[in-house]
Amino acid sequence: MLDNLNWWEIGALLLLALLIFGDRLPAVITDGLRLVRNLRNMARNATGDLSRELGTDIQLEDLHPKAFIRKHLLSEEDEAAIRKPLQGVYDNLRADVSGVHNDLKDVANAADLRSNDARSSGTATSSSPSAPAPRVSYDDAT
């Protein structure tokens, strides 16, 4: 959270907090820490109550709806049945994408070989027009 602050900025923030809160700064820090501690205890108690009511062990990370359904409502067979139709589509799509990728590599290699052959021979054929020289802009020169 404070990764992009350097030591001078942190010191300036602490000095600003001291100027704003003055003598009450230790009390404000204590109250803030007590608030964080109470929020953690409330979250821990809520997950404990939920675990007791459902009869399973629930962690705070399990309260995300997808994780909750996957862990507590679906069996492994149900999850496999849901994934099975999509797995074939995924495999076909992956094969198509890898085929296109390989074709593009082949075209790029062929184009690179042709341009290297033309440069190495030193003569360009008259049937292929030569590319115009790139324009030099003011930004490139400076």
Image (tube, helix red, strand yellow):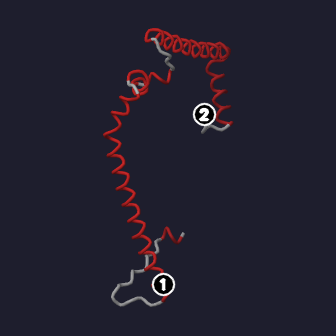
The amino acid sitting under disc 2 is Leu
* Separation (CA) of disc 2 from disc 1: 54 Å
The relative height of residue 6 versus residue 111 in the rendered view (above or below) is above
The numbered dot on residue 2 is 2
Above or below: residue 110 compared with residue 23: below
Q: Is residue 98 above or below residue 44?
A: below
Q: Residue at x 60, y 34 (%)?
A: 2
Tell me the residue that label 1 is attached to: 119
Q: Decide which of 111, 67 is in the foreground and name it.
A: 67
| Residue at the farthest front position | 77
Q: Nearer the viewer, residue 14 or 107?
A: 107
The local secondary structure at tag 1 comes to: helix
Where residue 59 appears, as percent x and y from the top left, is 51, 20
Location of residue 83 in the rendering, given as x and y in whole percent from the top left corner: 35, 36
User: In the image, what residue type sits under mark 1?
Assistant: Arg
Which residue is located at x 62 percent, y 16 percent? 33
Q: Is residue 3 left or right of residue 134?
A: right
